[in-house]
Amino acid sequence: MSSRGTHTVLNAQAKGGAISLVHPRWADFDAWAALRRENTEYLRPWEPDVSTHGLNRPAYRGRLSRLKKLVQQDRAYPFHIFRGETLVGACNVTHIERGTAQSAKLGYWIGEQFIGRGFARASVGAATTFCFNGLGLHRVEAAVQSDNAASMKVLQSQEFIFEGTARGMLKINGEWRDHDIYAKLSSD
Ligand SMILES: CC(C)(COP(=O)(O)OP(=O)(O)OC[C@H]1O[C@@H](n2cnc3c(N)ncnc32)[C@H](O)[C@@H]1OP(=O)(O)O)[C@@H](O)C(=O)NCCC(=O)NCCS
């Protein structure tokens, strides 16, 4: 992990090669918009807000400015995942709670053309280590629909433990969907 102010970079080794996790940058726009556009239908069953409306430069500028503020405020740490120079997905640490909770939530997606190469496993592993060792958090949580076998496998491989089911947790593709809650605690 390297960190310069709000410019954290996480490096990890995946089955499909070395990856790096970098905060979203202006230079990522073309690759990000293309990957999101190509994967609209792939992501629709799993993500709350899948739309092509925000895939333009003004919306991306606003998005970057919101994300930068969240990082500065220690509320979220969004990452684009790169295999070499190629953007393959994203992994976001969000909903950071300090005080007595010291917790965060994790969300991630990989473009369909890049799945099955261990990029999600490696990203979740690196982001979780960053939460514990870089941010000093105690608990990292992820919510998964119970029919998302690949995502559950990713979390289990990184020693996240199933804790229970949150009913009607998120509206996805027009329906309130139950989600299984997985979490990992720091060893401290
Ligand atoms: C879930 C997702 C992130 C996985 O990305 P990925 O890079 O392919 O994940 P990995 O390669 O690190 O690991 C996936 C594991 O699930 C397994 N897997 C894939 N599809 C599976 C299925 N239908 N049933 C069971 N296991 C499956 C893979 O074989 C792999 O296990 P292995 O490493 O033991 O072979 C990706 O498919 C995705 O972005 N899906 C849509 C968005 C999403 O679901 N995000 C997570 C929301 S909680």
Image (tube, grey):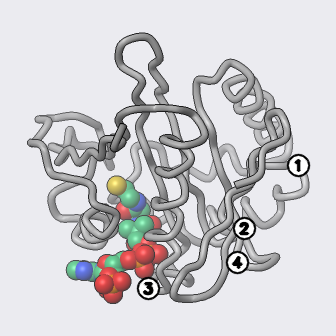
For disc 3, does the CB lie below 8 Å from ligand 1?
Answer: yes
Q: Amino acid at mark 2?
A: Ala
Q: CA distance from mark 4 to mark 2?
A: 16 Å
159 with respect to 112 (left or right) = left
- How many dots with numbers? 4
Could you tell which of marks 3 and 4 lies nearer the N-terminus?
Answer: 4
Tell which of 2 and 95 is nearer to you.
2
The residue at which mark 3 appears reads as: 116
The reply to whether the C-beta atoms of the residues labelled 2 and 1 are less than 8 Å apart is: no
Residue furthest out toward the top: 99
Could you tell which of marks 3 and 2 lies nearer the N-terminus?
Answer: 2
Q: CA distance from mark 3 to mark 2?
A: 20 Å
The residue at which mark 1 appears reads as: 26
Could you tell which of marks 1 and 4 lies nearer the N-terminus?
Answer: 1
Residue 123 lies, in percent from the top left, at 53, 63
Q: CA distance from mark 3 to mark 4?
A: 13 Å
Q: Amino acid at mark 1?
A: Trp
The residue at which mark 4 appears reads as: 83
State the SS at label 3: loop
The residue at which mark 2 appears reads as: 34
The reply to whether the C-beta atoms of the residues labelled 3 and 2 are less than 8 Å apart is: no
- In percent of the image, x 54 and y 43: which residue is there? 133
141 with respect to 84 (left or right) = left
Tell which of 113 and 77 is nearer to you.
77
Residue 134 lies, in percent from the top left, at 60, 40
